[in-house]
Amino acid sequence: MVGIARLRDAPSLGAFFREAWKEAGPNALGFTGATKEDIDEIASVEFLTKRLSDPSVRFVVAKRGGKVLGIASMRKLKGGTAELSGVIVRESETKMGVGTRLVRRAIKEATRLGIAKMIVKTEVLNERAIKFYTKNGFVVKGKSTVKVGKTRVAVQVLERDLVPTWGSSRPGGA
């Protein structure tokens, strides 16, 4: 099942973050620059409750039998754009379609909210992620750097235009 995470999901999302980080390894692409302290902070119930309460943030969660298999986080930016700020799937669930279902649900939610464009950033060396995002309709737009903890990370910026659904409140929506 893939759906929008609720406040009650904070403990299971936190456990998932910790497990995914341990499973992938602290130096794995996607976690570049993240320390145990960084993971402990973003996996805390307090942090996740605050994020889940923020109206500009959505977490999409994939579960099977109550176990979190993966998550996608997005946040609304200015100008009708959303940033897909993280897609994490358990290593044991990769190549099973979980990531694709998460991205599709995030796009559906962004479109429902009237968002016209979605961006995502991933490490320039993360060829697997770049291939995944381009397969899911994102186009490479350029490079940038982001700060993760105390580390500056070179990232590839990808973008996807979103199609409004019927009844969209977005200008030009049907």
Image (spheres, rainbow, N blue to C red):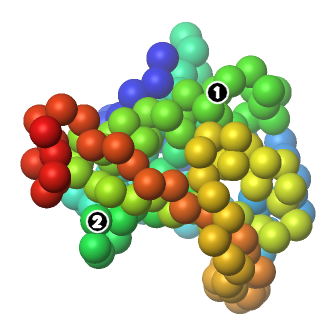
Say which element carries label 2.
Answer: loop
**Quadrant location of the C terminus in the rendered image:** top left
Specify the label residue 80 is tagged with: 2
Residue 150: where, in percent of width, then height? Answer: 71, 88
For this rendering, which residue is in front, 21 or 117?
117
The residue lying toward the viewer, choosing from 107 and 87, is 107
Q: Amino acid at mark 2?
A: Gly
- The mark found on residue 98 in the picture is 1
Dot in front, 2 or 1 = 2
Q: Is residue 156 above or below residue 12?
A: below
In the figure, is residue 166 to the left or right of 162?
left
The residue shown at (68%, 24%) is 97
The quadrant in which residue 123 appears is bottom right
Indicate the position of residue 110 as horizontal and vertical percent values.
33, 47
Alpha carbon distance from label 2 to label 1: 26 Å
Label 2 environment density (alpha carbons within 10 Å; few <14, some 14–19, many ≥20): some
Query: What residue is rendered at 55% in x and 28% in y?
Result: 101
Above or below — where is 155 with respect to 151?
Answer: above
Q: Amino acid at mark 1?
A: Val
